[in-house]
Image (cartoon, helix red, strand yellow):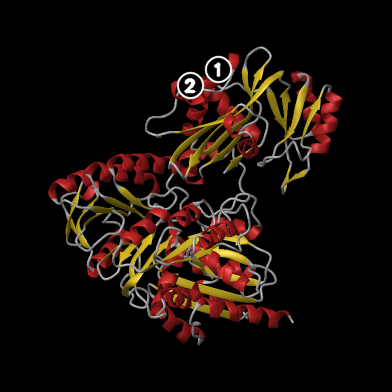
Amino acid sequence: MNFEEHAAKPLLVVAGIAAPEGRYVRTADDAARAQQVIGPCVVKAQAPTGKRGKAGGIKTADTPEEAKAVAEKILGMDIAGHVVEGVLVEARSDIKREFYAAIMNSPASKGPLVIFSTEGGMDIEDVAAQTPDKIKRATVDIRDGFGAKAATAMLAGLDLGEATAGVSEALGKLYAAYIANDAELLEINPLVLTGDGALVALDCKFVMDDSAIKRQATLAELGTPEKLTALEARGEAAAIKYIELDGDIGILANGAGLTMTTMDVVRHHGGNPANFCEIGGEAYTKAQTALEMVLDKPGIKSLVVNFCGAFARCEVMMEGLLNAWDELKPEIPVFFSIAGTGDEEAIAMLKDRLGLDPYPDMDAACKAAVDAAKVGGA
Amino acid sequence: MIIVRKEHRVLIQGITGKQGTFWTELMQDYGTIVVGGVNPKKAGTTHCGVPVYASAVEAMKETPFDVSVLFIPPLGVKDAALDAIEAGAKNLCILTEHIPVQDVMHFMAAAKDADTDITGPNTAGSVTVGECFLGFMPAFNQRIFKPGRIGVISRSGSLGTLMCQNIVSAGYGQSAFIGIGGDPIIGTTTRAALEALDADGGTDAVVVVGEIGGEMEEHAAEYAAKMDKPVIAFIAGGAAPKGKKMGHAGAIVMGDRGTYQSKSKALQAAGASVLATPSHVGDVLKERLGL
């Protein structure tokens, strides 16, 4: 789950890392009022994505009128598909140096990874490509933690001048915030050294581990929920993973890998998937709800049902699907591929209740669905 | 220890639950030696014909085991895994999906110190065909698993199962199926499983079932380039939109990383055959094995 800057920065402040004085507001008038209190400021678009500056979503303002004018421009902007609904009005900092600091989950080391660079304010991938010697990394054993001492060892060789001790402390605090908030990424870019020698977080990116939402329920309320279509929201409410796509061939399968592959094979045969809908894992008893959602997508011309039972049992999925079928009586052509746990029972049920046989493999089923969609569209 | 054999003794943590019970019975029927189970609330009782202990450490004292299979809800996995690692298990099979990643990192670090291999999390399990199986795999279905000489590695249970069925319909059988799991941080990686199957005398060729996200297939390709045994791969998710988690937490393309193109290119450069669809696996096996 992503958090906007205004929701993420307080987590740093709690951990002891300074951030500029700021107000989150949702109207241009409130931006003007915030400017009056704060003084010379930066008005920053709030959206759960990077590149806000490049998109024109970050502007300075020296007067309330200016703050109002830039806020009017920024509010309602579309940045990478996110409509800006609020701005952060923040005191301007006297920037002497800009650093980069982040803690993230590393699949390679299977533990936390600390990254620091003296080149802040840039995309860290670009720094890694252009000046790799200006980046330091440390892998952490999560059982040991990461404090200022470990940070000092990691930073050896970088010229940090007067900021040396402060940066080590800030990294330790950033790590503590990463742990406390079940972050999968907690990044400050830039972390600036100000004219009077203070370290201040000018931006903050926080992505929370989705699997930790249950134990971070209060915090999760401050996050930005993924933008869902009406059908996707129905899927989420029913604990079924449904992703709406722009094609005309409905897909219902079990398991993430099999469902993705069904999309791939439909595409391989020249068709366009209308959705990703999987009822694997604990969701395998929900075929009825899943079928209703797949069929409710407008413009659907044919349907592939691809069951391969492992944990999910084919006969349970088929029972749910056939119950929904009896109720909805859809008229679009449907093509089945069935294998795995409970396949014989499921195939017998299909024959008995719909008078259909499954195709010998998923390629055949997907190809037939693609052909049927073309006929249906003609 | 990555490939589990018929002589290995297996503990089931969470044996008394509905899924634990259902799959323990199937594992026992297939030949897996289940020596005990764990449920602190039912310690001292017998379930599925085996004793139930308060912890894996207690179980190890009474009935030594090699492997533990965890049927445990997400927030309980960390403690259960640490218990099994402390007990001295050689391998843990962790089926649970949606475990907080910081919990995963914690028991991964402990497992590394103790030299315990972890399969998963978010795996459907593994099958050593004709010997034993762990987790929720349809090992007993003879149209899907038949003794043979093809090793299979899969991030996905359902797609791995489908691939196994295609292998059997083409007239082949499997030596072992290793389900590595769909999470971004897992114990046994594609590469580690590939090394295990390369070293396995019963395996002539390896089928890798990968998916978009992460860099595991790219790392496995580095090893595949050095192998004499043919490697055949299918990568799921070529048609997936960017930036969306496709059901598995690990299956997400960010920018240019984790893409279908990056993975298939790396595997092809390593001499692996990359399948356009899973249905072609039989034809390619015939071509590569010269049958």
User: How far across and how far down the image is residue B62, in percent?
Assistant: 13, 49
User: In the picture provided, is B284 more to the left or to the right than B35?
Assistant: right
**Which quarter of the rendered picture does the N terminus of chain A lie within?**
top right
Tell me, yes or no, if residue A278 can be seen here. Answer: no
Amino acid on which disc 1 is placed: Thr
User: How far across and how far down the image is residue A3, in percent?
Assistant: 61, 38
**Which quarter of the rendered picture does the C terminus of chain A lie within?**
bottom right
Q: Which mark is residue A164?
A: 1
Tell me, yes or no, if residue B56 can be seen here. Answer: yes
The reply to whether label 1 and label 2 mark residues of one chain is: yes
Give the labeled residue for mark 2.
Answer: A152
Q: Residue at x 49, y 82 (%)?
A: A358
Q: Are marks 1 and 2 in contact (CB under 8 Å)?
A: yes
User: How far across and how far down the image is residue B242, in percent?
Assistant: 63, 55
Which one is nearer the viewer's eye here, B249 or A135? A135
Which one is nearer the viewer's eye here, A290 or B276? B276
Q: Residue at x 47, y 46 (%)?
A: A211
In the image as oriented, which residue stretches furthest toward the left?
A: B62
Looking at the rendering, which quadrant does residue A167 occupy? Answer: top right
Q: Residue at x 67, y 68 (%)?
A: A247
Q: Chain of mark 2?
A: A
- Is disc 1 placed on a helix, strand or loop? helix
User: How far across and how far down the image is residue A251, in percent?
Assistant: 57, 70
Q: Is residue B110 above or below residue B257?
A: above
User: In the picture provided, is A119 more to the left or to the right than A183?
Assistant: right
In the image as oriented, which residue stretches furthest toward the top?
A: A196
Answer few, some or many: residues within 10 Å of disc 2's Cα (few below 14, many 20 plus, some between 14 and 19).
Answer: some
